[in-house]
Image: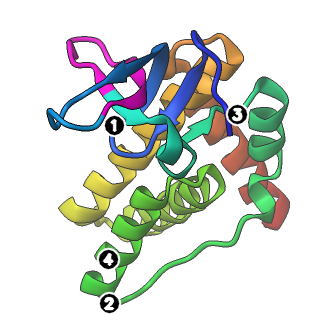
Amino acid sequence: MEFEIGSWVMYSATGICRILSREKKCFDGVHETEYYKLEPLREGTHSVYYIPVLTAASKLRPLMDAPQVHDLIQHIQDLPCRWCADRNARKELFHQILRQDDPEQLLTMVKSLHTQQEARSRAGKKLSSSDEAALHSAEQILNEEFALALHMQPGEIPLLVQQALHTTSRAES
């Protein structure tokens, strides 16, 4: 898969990055290899990353576009709630989902955590700190990608997701 210079991509290890250029580099002093030079979207990050062109397809993916994001949010009610009662197994499941970089799985995780958060709140309880951290991580990834696709600010995305979740909750009642 070829990526265009100037395009935005999801780099699984870092998040959203812009492809700045395609350059030949010799990092080992022996072999010259062609790389994509990436700049992270997150403010305060002054790093650049070099991803070998030959292996880029396994580490980079194109960002979703606006119709894909709208479709995913509109179909949040079709996503299953996945909850594992065992805290350690749940922590591992969420860790795997965060590593996989699959927006649908991330949104499923967010839906599941919000559903659990509401149930625990009705019982006067909160999510565990590890569940809160997992929720924050998943939301941050989704908010950045959805915001870029929809030409919005990341802080505006949770309202869209919450509205879809509450529509789901009312429809299921």
Q: CA distance from mark 1 to mark 2?
A: 29 Å
Tell me how the rendering is colored. rainbow
Label 1, secondary structure: give it: loop
Q: CA distance from mark 4 to mark 2?
A: 10 Å
Q: CA distance from mark 3 to mark 1?
A: 17 Å
Q: Is residue 83 left or right of residue 130?
A: right
Q: At label 2, which amino acid type do we have? A: Asp
Q: Residues within 10 Å of mark 3 (few under 14, many from 20)?
A: some
Q: Residues within 10 Å of mark 4 (few under 14, many from 20)?
A: few
Q: CA distance from mark 4 to mark 1?
A: 20 Å
Q: How far from the left and from the top, in percent, is residue 80?
A: 69, 72
Residue assigned mark 3: 64
Q: Residue at x 42, y 28 (%)?
A: 35
The answer to which of marks 1 and 2 sits earlier in the sequence is 1
Q: Residues within 10 Å of mark 2 (few under 14, many from 20)?
A: few
Q: At label 1, which amino acid type do we have? A: Thr
